[in-house]
Image: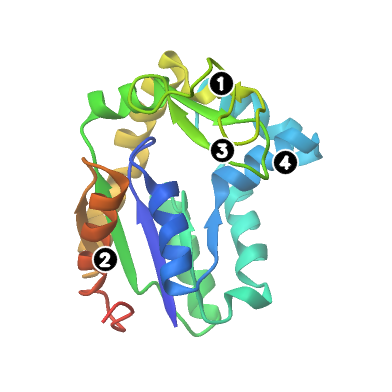
Amino acid sequence: MTNLILLGPPGSGKGTQGERLEVELSLPRLSTGDMLREAVKKGTDLGRQVEPIMKSGSLVPDEVVVEIIAERIGQADCGKGFILDGFPRTIPQAEALEAMLTEKGTAVTGVLNIAVPDQVLIDRCVGRRLCSNKECGAIYHVKSNPPAQDNVCDRCGSELLHRSDDRAEAVEERLRNYHRQTEPLEDFYSSRGLLHEVDGVGSPHEVFERTLEALRGVSGGCCE
C-alpha cells in the first residue's frame, strides 16, 4: 500500500502534481480544498460553516477536516492507498492521521515537500484564473498562460474565475498561516524519515520529473 502526502504552501503546485501522480500511480487524490470548495458551492451545512473561514485565508478547524478525511479514506477506492493533497495542515491533524491509519493497520509511506519561494507563490496565485465549468477544469495565468480572450476559457468558452482565496490579501494570509501552522510538519515528517524535498520552481513537467525522482526514495518503491 502506498499512502502519500503532498506538502507545500498555497500555489506550490500540489494540485497539478497530485493529478499527475493520480494517473502515474493509479491512486485516488484526496484534495481537502476541492472537497471544501464543493461543499461551499453546493451550499451544504459544511459549506456555510467554512465559507467565511476560507474567504479570509484562515485554516478550517482541525476537527472538521479530520472528519472529512476519515470518511473519505474509508471508501473502497482507497484500498490500495491514496494521495493526500492539502492534508494534514497542522501537527494535530498529522497526529490524528497517524492514529487513524494505525487503526487500519497501515501508515504514511512518504511525504513530498514541494518548495517554492513566497514571492513566486504570490505571483502564481494572484494571477491564476480557473474555468468556471468544473467538467473542463482548465487553469490559466494572466501573465504566463493567458487565455486568448480575457476571462473566457479557450477550451469550452466558459467564464474564468479569480478565486477569492487567490486575491493578494488572502494569499498573504494563507502564507502566514502556512509558515506558522503547516511548515512545522516538515520537521515532524523528517524526524520519521518520511520527508522528500522537491524543488517546485519550473514548468509542471520539470517539477513532475523531480517528483518522480523523489518518489524513488519512498518506502515501498512505488516508482521503481
**Tag 4, which secondary structure?**
helix
**Please, what is the three-letter code of the amino acid marked with disc 1?**
Ser
Which residue is the site of mark 2?
212
Q: Is residue 128 left or right of residue 156?
A: left
Name the mark nearer the viewer: 2 or 4: 2
| Residue drawn at 49 percent across, 35 percent down | 139
x then y, percent, for residue 73: 60, 68
Residue on which the image places disc 1? 164
Residue at figure coordinates x 29%, y 56% from the top left: 208
Q: How many marks?
A: 4
Instruction: From the viewer's side, name the closer residue of 41 and 101.
Output: 41
- Amino acid type assigned to the residue bearing label 3 in the image: Val
Query: 50 or 208, which lies in front?
Result: 208
Q: Counting residues from the N terminus, which is met first, the one under dot 1 or under dot 4?
A: 4
Residue 204 visible in the displayed image? yes
What x and y, as percent, mark residue 51? Answer: 66, 28
Residue, disc 3 = 60
Q: In the picture shown, does residue 187 fall above or below 76?
A: above
- The amino acid type found where label 4 is placed reads Ala
The image shows residue 32, relative to residue 129, as above or below, that is: below
Label 2 or label 3, whichever comes before in sequence order: 3
- Where's residue 142, x and y in %? 41, 19
